[in-house]
Amino acid sequence: MTTVDADPYAAYTEQAESYDVGWAELDEVLPPFTAGLLTAAGRLLATLAYRDALDYGDRPFKRRSPKARHRVLAKLPTDCDGQDQAFRLQFARALNDLADDIEAGRAPLPRCTGERHALELMIDYAPQLLACADGELRQLGIPVPDTDDEYDYHAPYWDPVWSEFIVDGAEDSISEAQATEDDQDQPEPPPDGWTAPRFWFSPYGITTVRDPGRGHLDWVTASLDGGGLVEPQPQGFARAARLLGFTDRADPWQAYTDEYRDESRCLPEVLTPLGATLLEAAARELVARGYQEVVAYGDRPFDRDAAEDDYSDASDDGFLALLPSVCDGQNAAWRLAMVRAVNDLAEDLRAGRAPLPRCNAEEIALHLILSWAAALLEDLDDPQVAAEHGVPTREAFTVRHRQFAQMRETFLQDDDFMMFYDAGMADVAGDPDHVAMQYLHVGDIRPPSWWWTFGNLRPRDAARGFDPQVLERLASSPALRFTGPEGVGEPEGSDTIPVLPAGLAEEFELFVGLAQRRFFDRRCAIAMARSLARLLTAFLDAPDLHVHRVWMLGQRAVVGEEMLIVDEDFSIDGQRHTWRLHADQTDGQARSWTLQLLADCSTKILLQYATAAPELLLDMDHTTPPPVDQSLPQALAERSRTLGQTTTLAGFLRHRRHTLGVDLHHVAEAAILPSAVIAGWEAGGPAAPSQMIRCAPVLQLPEAVLLTAADGRRDPGYWPLPAIRTTAHGSEGAE
């Protein structure tokens, strides 16, 4: 970059003194690397902006058209869409003018609102060029940092560029905003302001005016002269679009939920594509080693002393040895998921996404990848090693491609897990109730709790599966304890399990959930009363036996114009017991209580219809009650038995599988258990804790949540209680 003007701020006029303008040393705001990126971004954007002006001419820009997504015109405010070709050519030239300023050693001072928008666009897209290889940057005229120290390099910081060169209120200095000889008062701003498109190229009074006869680039002039669209060389349209990211590509931050999404961040500022290849190569090697060791060790505790002897002739450790020692006793399903956590991050890298850990296990996985990548880098001086890993030799990985410390800071939520690698802190980290852990608000970071998804990230696809070859090897591994437990057959056939009436299971779960709400307020009571009526109706599954005819009118509660089957205290008289609706129960308590209530109230219904005088049934005076099916009591007993088998664990497993979109096969595969075992739990069968916790990784939750469910308690964080909503008529319902 050659200096032409001795004063980089020479374009400012005396009027600029009335505005808050910056006068910082140009090299401080625009050091060579930053200046080179901004200049190249301006040139490339100008190429694409000129193309758009020539393509669209005077036609309105339609943002919804398929080709509009990757146009510079789409980056302008919508009130520019109807502007003509002359306007668009001026904007493209503004990008080139600012690039000329920087290249000549002048501050890129916007001299009109159009140039201000041009500079903002250059600042937004210059970071995209960091994705280029060093050679391509040099081809663009960008001086590549020559430091070899990671801590001496920082990606360009763009806020000073914005604050020094973009002057707030500069649009008030255009001639249209000034008093005239005829009117000494300052004119009122128009409704759309002085920044409206029609004022974009009115020169600022705080800067000198550019040469109005400067014209456009030669290839643009040739195109305008009727020779057809002339593509500039070597910066062709396709290359400019690729370098600036005006193409279809993966969203690098798609793992974040909408609330935490920040599209202003640019991944190449932290992780370049070349840096991603290094991390992916390291992850690939870790995955290969990890799966090999999962098969070899199975469920056996990891013996570090023995492993050290096994690797005594090797230059590095195995996968399990890289994990904290607190992981040594984990089962094979946990280890399998841990290796897959590394592989998931490798898939992110291969797809051009940021390797964002979505749970504590993946944070450990990223730590392993970064550490392994740094070690691998030292071996890449050998071309043969580089070729084996499919990456360039070490000299290609200049400082901006190996910002390991910055990657940790950007991608990790925190580094609390590192306490497990510190002998002095490992015991503290292993005790969530320790005063230090409570003070730091760390929570439970023990390995059994590594699988819940962080709240600001989307969960991974739980049905993504594993490498079939790995599963085949695991199935035959003698190191596994649970590959073929005795006494486990296929789940009980559907012909021996009574088929429940439509809606009964769902209504049962709804009522049980309402009975667990923290407060039994009026809204909860009404929702439970309504659910109870539907539950009894579905349980009987006998259209002639009307539930609402059994409980007398004088004893029933009323909501608006609706009569409930409970009284004003939300109680209902069964055959042997008066049941008062209430909440604040555990899931296990609620299920047992609901089954008893169903049995007693359904008995009353049957006896009332079978033996009571017709006048005791509402709306049936002088009418013969319908006969009661003699087989119904036995059917109700079978239904009650079937509902009773829907334990807290069974209901939770079904809910969690439905939420994650996984079937029994996926869960069994990840837990390294027969599908019949999982099916047995969902049918209400007993579950051994040591087997059950193997499902925690694939179900993306802490092992303690499964143990809690097996104990008859529901964790509403993973299985929410029913929400009570207001109906269209203003009364309460539940869902």
Image (tube, rainbow, N blue to C red):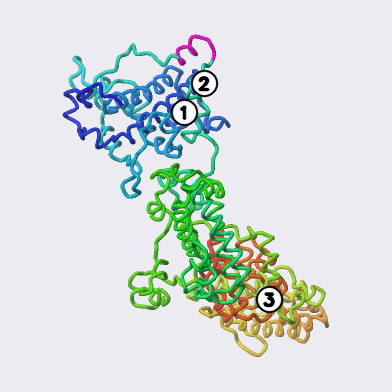
First of labels 1, 2 by sequence position: 2
Q: From mark 1 to mark 3, how far is it between C-alphas?
A: 63 Å
Question: How far across and down, in percent of the image, does residue 715 sit?
Answer: 53, 73
User: On the image, numbered disc 2 is attached to which residue?
Assistant: 56
User: On the image, numbered disc 1 is attached to which residue?
Assistant: 73
Q: Secondary structure at mark 1?
A: helix
Q: Neighbour class for label 2 at 10 Å: few (<14), some, many (≥20)? A: some
Q: On the rendered structure, is 89 left or right of 28?
A: right
Q: Secondary structure at mark 2?
A: helix
Work out whether residue 637 can be spotted: yes
Q: Is residue 597 above or below residue 211?
A: below
Q: Neighbour class for label 1 at 10 Å: few (<14), some, many (≥20)? A: many
Question: Which residues, given as a range, are shown in magenta?
Answer: 219-228
Question: How far across and down, in percent of the image, does residue 408 sit?
Answer: 41, 55
User: On the image, numbered disc 3 is attached to which residue?
Assistant: 536
Amino acid type of the residue that numbered disc 1 sits on in the rendered structure: Leu
Along the viewing direction, whichever of 412 and 570 lies nearer the viewer: 412
Direction front: furthest residue: 313
Along the viewing direction, whichever of 507 and 534 lies nearer the viewer: 507
Which circle marks residue 149 in the picture?
none
Name the quadrant containing residue 341.
bottom right
Quadrant in which the C terminus is drawn: bottom right
Q: Is residue 716 above or below residue 86?
A: below
Going 51% across and 74% down the picture, which residue do you hit?
A: 328
Q: From mark 3 to mark 2, how far is it between C-alphas?
A: 68 Å
Question: How far across and down, in percent of the image, does residue 536 sit?
Answer: 68, 76
Amino acid type of the residue that numbered disc 3 sits on in the rendered structure: Leu
Q: From mark 1 to mark 2, how far is it between C-alphas?
A: 10 Å
Work out whether residue 510 can be spotted: no
Q: Neighbour class for label 3 at 10 Å: few (<14), some, many (≥20)? A: many
Q: Is 227 within the magenta? A: yes
Along the viewing direction, whichever of 421 and 38 lies nearer the viewer: 421
